[in-house]
């Protein structure tokens, strides 16, 4: 299985402190405070679906993984069954699924086409 950490190594124990959704542009932004106290924005472009759970006062992230459509592990489909429909549609062949693997707090998935990392 090919998985990719969207923000590379050294991301462990960063914190998501905000989420901004622009439905018109189909863009979802995660505001992230890194362990060194710098902040970045993970901008997920052409976000077609998202589902979050447990957003709280503390949202420490272990990693944010990205999977191609055919590589999504079964546990993600079990936790987010709405993704099963996307897996079977050819329209989404170029899309990926980001999985927020939490240490504490926020977990979730985002179906997206591309991403960029911006300075906050």
Image (spheres, helix red, strand yellow):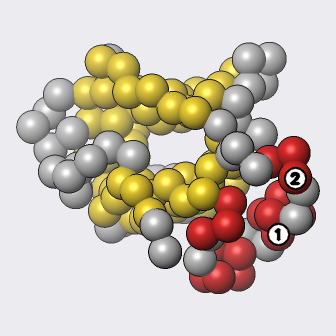
Depth check, mark 2 against mark 1: the one in front is: 2
Residue 57 rendering spot, x and y as whole percentages: 39, 50
Query: Residue 90 shows which numbered tag?
Result: 2
The residue drawn where x is 80% and y is 17% is 24
Label 2: state its secondary structure. helix
Q: Quadrant of residue 88?
A: bottom right
In three-dimensional space, the C-alpha distance between marks 2 and 1, rounded to whole angstroms, equals: 13 Å
Relative to residue 34, is residue 100 depicted above or below?
A: below
| Camera sees residue 106 | no
Residue 73 rendering spot, x and y as whole percentages: 59, 77
The residue drawn where x is 46% and y is 67% is 2
Disc 1: which residue: 84
Q: Dot 2: few (<14), some (14–19), or many (≥20) neighbours within 10 Å?
A: few
Residue 75 rendering spot, x and y as whole percentages: 61, 82
Residue 58 rendering spot, x and y as whole percentages: 35, 53
Q: Quadrant of residue 120?
A: top left
Q: Relative to 39, is 87 on the left or the right?
A: right
Q: Quadrant of residue 7?
A: top left
Q: Relative to 107, is 35 on the left or the right?
A: left
């Amino acid at each position: 299985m090919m998985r990719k950490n969207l923000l590379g190594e050294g991301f462990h124990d960063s914190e998501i402190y905000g989420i901004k959704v622009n439905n018109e542009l189909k863009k979802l932004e995660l505001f992230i405070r890194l362990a060194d106290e710098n902040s970045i924005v993970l901008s997920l472009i052409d976000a077609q679906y998202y589902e979050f759970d447990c957003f709280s006062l503390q949202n420490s992230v272990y990693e944010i993984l990205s999977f191609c459509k055919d590589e999504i592990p079964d546990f993600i489909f079990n936790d987010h069954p709405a993704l099963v429909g996307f897996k079977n549609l050819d329209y989404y062949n170029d899309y990926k699924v980001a999985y927020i693997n939490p240490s504490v707090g926020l977990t979730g998935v985002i179906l997206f086409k591309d991403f960029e990392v911006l300075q906050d």
